Amino acid sequence: MCRHLAYLGPPIDLSALLLEPPHSLLRQSWAPRDMRGGGTINADGFGVGWYARDTAPIRYRRDRPMWADENFARLAEVTVSGAVLAAVRSATPGMPVIEAACAPFTEGPWLFSVNGLVASWPDSINKLAEGLPVRDLLTLDAPTDAALVWALVRRRLRDGAQPAEAVARTVVDVVAAAPGSRLNVLLTDGVTAVANTFGHSLSLRQRADAVQVASEPCDADPTWRALPDRVLVTFTSSYVDTSMLPIETGQP
């Protein structure tokens, strides 16, 4: 499955965050340590989103491995941000390997990523998809489970749900409709971020002025801590709140 991370804190260059650590997201694209649920490498594309000043997020996506994109390496050396969401992709068998299928997905201030799969796709989630506006279905970024999960979260956000509620209720609904699904979600507007665990690994590092979550710790810093399964984390650069997902049935 995919690997992803989110960072909120003092401005940092993308190279220092994503490429240089000993077990960086770059390294996780070809040498992940915890690909529970299938897959061996994350070579089916990648994406990075970041915030600059008060603008909407900037996004860079490619349908190639992160290690094969020299342009991004050069861009990362000169790009600085205090809010970043990034992902490397291992496509679920049968799903397209195209740029538009790569996280982060975005609308307005939001960046979104999901690590996992919807079991028995697409039949299992038909009823949930029927509740979306037809226009949303016709304009999905890609015909993938991740893009549909984003559409479900996005609709709740548009309807006024708080980010944590939008993520939690969507994960609960998808798992109920498609038992056996694995869904770790990241969502941020550049100020607050939401992350959850359901069937995949996620670790958190909190410092006085920065919080980072990642599918796998990016270095040997002892302050990284693995999050238990079925938790929901809301954080800013200086605050972390952890609660349990309201899921009682279904096994990841």
Image: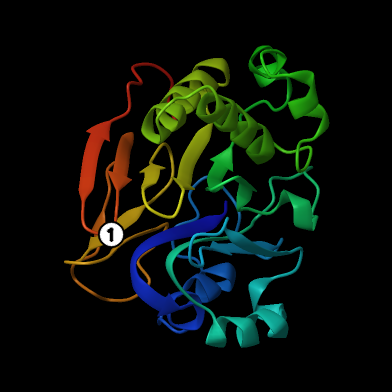
Q: Quadrant of residue 108?
A: top right
**Viewer-closest of 176 and 82:** 82
In which quadrant is the C terminus drawn? top left
What residue is drawn where x is 56% and y is 28%? Answer: 158
Q: Quadrant of residue 226?
A: bottom left
**Viewer-closest of 155 and 16:** 155
- Provide residue 145's location: percent of width, then percent of height: 67, 35
What colouring style does the render use? rainbow
Compared to residue 203, the image places residue 73 above or below, namely: below
Count the numbered circles shown.
1
Please, what secondary structure does the residue beneath circle 1 have? loop
Q: Callout 1 environment at 10 Å: few (<14), some (14 to 19), or many (20+)?
A: many
What residue is drawn where x is 21% and y is 58%? Answer: 238
**Viewer-closest of 76 and 69:** 76
Compared to residue 10, the image places residue 89 above or below, namely: above
- Provide residue 75's location: percent of width, then percent of height: 62, 82
Q: Please name the amino acid that badge 1 sits on.
A: Ser
> Which residue was labeled with disc 1?
237
- Provide residue 184's location: percent of width, then percent of height: 46, 42
Question: In the figure, is residue 70 to the left or right of 244?
Answer: right
- Provide residue 119's location: percent of width, then percent of height: 61, 29
What residue is drawn where x is 57% and y is 54%? Answer: 2
Report the residue that reaches farthest toward the front: 54
